[in-house]
Image (cartoon, grey):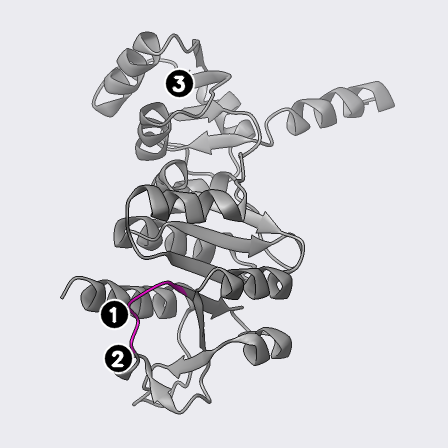
């Protein structure tokens, strides 16, 4: 029979693996980034395909690689799909909103920001981050409350895109919206009751697109603080889209307009 000490040791061990990156593509993108890595665990006997690339990259970056049994990786894994490799990293380094604005300025580009109002599903957040990075979004803003944080599931679903895009966490979305307006950004919210279709709205210039939560959409105050509301046409019997799908549709309309 296990005593209290055994449970304490197990709990401490579980907590020590809270910040991990799982999966081959995600770990490769991690190694290609500037983010610190504490250690990489690979499954014993795995010496084929991209695992060899990971080990070579880790050696070049002077990152410790440790071989462990599959059962150890299974225990550490949050996604249960580690693909034979897990990296242990320091907590995700969120940026300041000012860093996002500065990035756009340094590229001499109009600001393109995504604001997520209460996304709670890590798979949705990971998908949105992946699409945002490929669409050239300068940064993503999420609230500190009522939202999922960047964790191992988010990182894996994003295919490592979290390592290449700036993400800011703010205390109050509405205060941030007001500050962005002062910086000359137009705040464009997505809402099913809007009168304007997204493809009829000018999405060029300095903008921040707002995507609401999976179940409730944007909060009333965020909706009220938006300059413009747009909607996606719904032709079928289902009257709503997954948040990550909605985000992708509107983001790429902005990409199309901004590249004319």
Q: Earlier in the sequence, mark 2 or mark 1?
A: 2
**Are circles 1 and 3 on residues that touch, CB within 8 Å?**
no
Nearest to viewer (mark 1 / mark 3): 1
Residue 184 lies in quadrant: bottom left
Q: Residue at x 28, y 68 (%)?
A: 204
Secondary element type, mark 2: helix
Please state the horizontal and vertical placement of residue 69, each as a whole percent of the image.
Answer: 46, 17
Please tell me which residue lies in front, 140 or 88. Answer: 140
The residue that label 2 is drawn on is: 199
Q: Earlier in the sequence, mark 2 or mark 3?
A: 3
Q: Tell how many labels.
A: 3
Secondary element type, mark 1: helix
Q: Which mark is residue 253?
A: 1
Farthest residue in the right direction? 4
Q: Any magenta on residue 213?
A: no
Q: Which residues are magenta?
A: 202-207
Please tell me which residue lies in front, 215 or 143. Answer: 143
Real-space Cα distance between discs 2 and 1? 7 Å
Above or below for 81 versus 31: below
**Are circles 2 and 1 on residues that touch, CB within 8 Å?**
yes
Q: Residue at x 56, y 25 (%)?
A: 90
Q: Residue at x 33, y 13 (%)?
A: 45
Work out which quarter of the rendered image holds the C terminus and state it: bottom left
Q: Earlier in the sequence, mark 1 or mark 3?
A: 3
Please tell me which residue lies in front, 255 or 184. Answer: 184
Real-space Cα distance between discs 1 and 3? 41 Å
Please state the horizontal and vertical placement of residue 11, each as a whole percent of the image.
Answer: 73, 27
Please tell me which residue lies in front, 27 or 91. Answer: 91
Q: Is residue 128 left or right of residue 14?
A: left
Q: Is residue 116 left or right of residue 28?
A: right
* Dominant SS type (magenta): loop
Q: Residues within 10 Å of mark 1 (few under 14, many from 20)?
A: some
């Amino acid at each position: 029979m296990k005593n209290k000490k055994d449970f304490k040791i197990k709990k401490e061990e579980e907590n020590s693996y809270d910040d991990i990156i799982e999966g081959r593509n995600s770990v490769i993108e991690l190694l290609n980034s500037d983010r610190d890595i504490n250690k990489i665990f690979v499954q014993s006997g795995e010496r084929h395909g991209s695992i060899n690339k990971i080990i070579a990259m880790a050696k070049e970056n002077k990152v410790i690689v440790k071989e462990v049994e599959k059962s150890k990786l299974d225990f550490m894994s949050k996604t249960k799909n580690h693909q034979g490799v897990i990296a242990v990293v320091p907590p995700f380094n969120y940026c300041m909103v000012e860093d996002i604005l500065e990035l756009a300025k340094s590229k001499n580009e109009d600001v393109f920001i995504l604001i997520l109002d209460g996304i709670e599903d890590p798979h949705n957040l990971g998908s949105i981050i992946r699409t945002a990075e490929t669409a050239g979004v300068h940064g993503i803003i999420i609230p500190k409350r009522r939202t999922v944080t960047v964790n191992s599931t988010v990182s894996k679903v994003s295919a490592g895109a979290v390592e290449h895009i700036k993400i800011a966490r703010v205390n109050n979305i509405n205060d941030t919206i007001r500050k962005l307006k002062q910086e000359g950004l137009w705040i464009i919210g997505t809402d099913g009751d809007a009168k304007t279709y997204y493809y009829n709205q000018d999405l060029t210039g300095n903008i921040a697109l707002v995507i609401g939560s999976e179940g409730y959409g944007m909060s009333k105050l965020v909706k009220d603080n938006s300059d413009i509301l747009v909607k996606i046409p719904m032709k079928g019997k289902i009257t709503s889209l997954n948040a990550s799908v909605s985000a992708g549709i509107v983001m790429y309309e902005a990409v199309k307009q901004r590249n004319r």
